[in-house]
Amino acid sequence: IHTGMRMVVENLSTFDNFPIEVAGKTGTAQQSPNRPNHALFVGYAPYSDPEVSIATRIAFGYTSHNAAEYAKNVFSYYFGVQDAEELLNGQAENVGESSNSFND
């Protein structure tokens, strides 16, 4: 499981060039065909000697990449990669496409 969770993050563009090794799992859940999917990311870091874990769920968050991006921001703050000011007042990013066909 440990290795598999690391492989998930290694194949997730959200964590490209991130200086801390993270392990995690993404997911989505559909509550209704008329609403966007819920977004999920659970993970921990550093991979080799876990210090902190996170579970991120964004209700109607469209894609798990959105939840992973939020988790990356938490890891960034926790490990001092970015400070709070930069995270809170930085620019929003387009984190990926969703297969969710809901239009709002």
Image: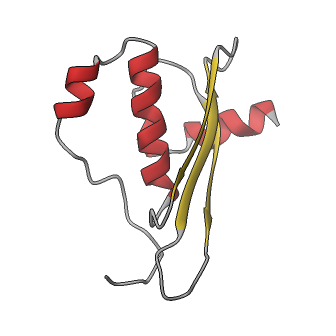
The quadrant holding residue 84 is: top left
Q: Residue furthest front?
A: 59
Q: Position of residue 20 (x, y in %)?
A: 50, 18
Q: Is residue 26 left or right of residue 2?
A: left
Indicate whether 12 appears above or below 96.
above
Q: Residue at x 47, y 62 (%)?
A: 63
Q: Nearer the viewer, residue 91 or 97?
A: 91
Q: Position of residue 26 (x, y in %)?
A: 61, 51
Q: Residue at x 82, y 37 (%)?
A: 1
> Going by the image, does 82 lie left or right of 47?
left
Residue at 28% x, 16% y: name it: 83
Vertical placement of 50 versus 27: above or below?
above
Q: What is the residue that sits farthest to the bottom in this orientation?
A: 34
Q: Is residue 60 left or right of residue 23?
A: left
Is residue 38 left or right of 42 when viewed as pictured?
left
Q: Position of residue 98 (x, y in %)?
A: 43, 69
Near-viewer residue (37 or 97): 37
Q: If the image is split into quadrants, where does the C terminus sit?
A: bottom left
**Up/down of 64 relative to 60, above or below:** above
Q: How is the image coloured?
A: secondary structure
Residue 62, position in %: x, y? 45, 67
Looking at the image, which residue is at 65% across and 13% down? 51
